[in-house]
Amino acid sequence: MPSHEPVGEVWTEREAKPRRKWHRETFACAFSGHVVPAATVARLRPEDAGLGFDLPDGRRFARCLRCDAWVRTVRPEHPEREHLPPVDQLAVPRRGRRLRDQMVLRLIAIDRGIHSVIFGTIAVGVILLDLNLGSLDTGARDLVNRLTGAASDTGPAATRSFLIRELQRFLHLHRHTLLILAVTAVAYCVVEGVESVGLWLEKRWAEYLTAIATAGFLPFEVHELIKRATGLRITALVVNAAILVWLIWKKRLFGIRGGAKALEGEEEFDRAKLFGPPAVPARAVGGSPAPPG
């Protein structure tokens, strides 16, 4: 027996059942669970019909405030309160556009977290390289000499030439260069990590930090793209530009579209209309409706 069943229209065999679409609210409820305040109160009143109702056999149907699914339950033995609060006092979870924005923000946080791990790995690699530079330098010089001697004995070879060239580039590395690379990688690791955590927790300062850091890094991405265009560089530039535009426009940063005040006062649905009791048709309460005119 399923834990809940949707209560809605019944489709006949002749009627084409509409295709089910993916809804972000259902996705969120699959991970976080339904939000059904009507399942926690002792008694439901007629004015609560939009949020829940009781059947004579003791069953109760409670509506999820996020995905609108009707959850089948029973009257609680230890209710949290006697009645539901007024509709305007309900703690409604994110749904609609606000839930979509939260999901996009979480995706950006995951992206920044991946960047932080990558930069951290680079920093560790550079630090280990710096610590072992002396022994590696000796080994690289010995290998260059061996390859050079082999190339002169057996004739030129493309593979040996490539290895010799790359090893000689390695031999020209300086500790000062490695130090700059390590410090840069550590700095980016920390910044990206702070962005990731702040965005996941939906902190306003993290949105500003991400926007400023992304905007500051875009000129370097454009410069590298001009030097050599690759699919990865183009994708990175497009993704970062899209993130920057989305943050500024959707999150109303830097006073755009009214700033934070307009964002806080934004309400995309009428609570009374959405969660209030359903309108009763005139035929159900008073026979046929009055003729027009």
Image: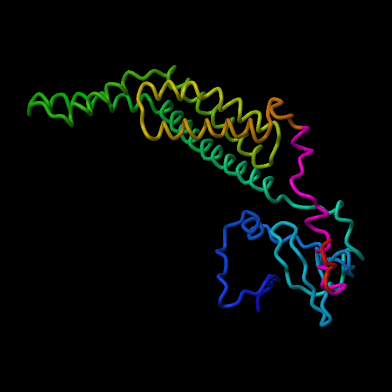
Q: Give the residue furthest to the front.
A: 293
Where 126 sits versus 70, above or below? above
Where 263 sits versus 226, above or below? below
The residue closer to the viewer here, 228 or 274, is 274
Seen at 32% across and 18% down, the residue is 172
Where 199 sits versus 76, above or below? above
| Image location of residue 49, percent across then percent down | 83, 66
Query: Residue 130 vs residue 27: left or right?
Result: left
| Image location of residue 219, percent across then percent down | 49, 21
Q: Give the residue furthest to the left.
A: 154
Seen at 55% across and 70% down, the residue is 16
| Image location of residue 252, percent across then percent down | 69, 31
Q: For residue 280: magenta?
A: yes
Where 267 sits versus 279, above or below? above
Q: For residue 274: magenta?
A: yes
Q: Quadrant of residue 18?
A: bottom right
Seen at 50% across and 35% down, the residue is 239
Q: How is the image coloured?
A: rainbow
The residue closer to the viewer here, 50 or 286, is 286
Q: Give the residue furthest to the right.
A: 82
| Image location of residue 247, percent across then percent down | 62, 33
Q: What residue span does the magenta drawing correspond to?
A: 261-287
Report the label total: 0
Q: Quadrant of the C terminus?
A: bottom right
Query: Residue 292 vs residue 156: left or right?
Result: right
Seen at 62% across and 46% down, the residue is 103
Q: Quadrant of the N terminus?
A: bottom right
The residue closer to the viewer here, 130 or 280, is 280
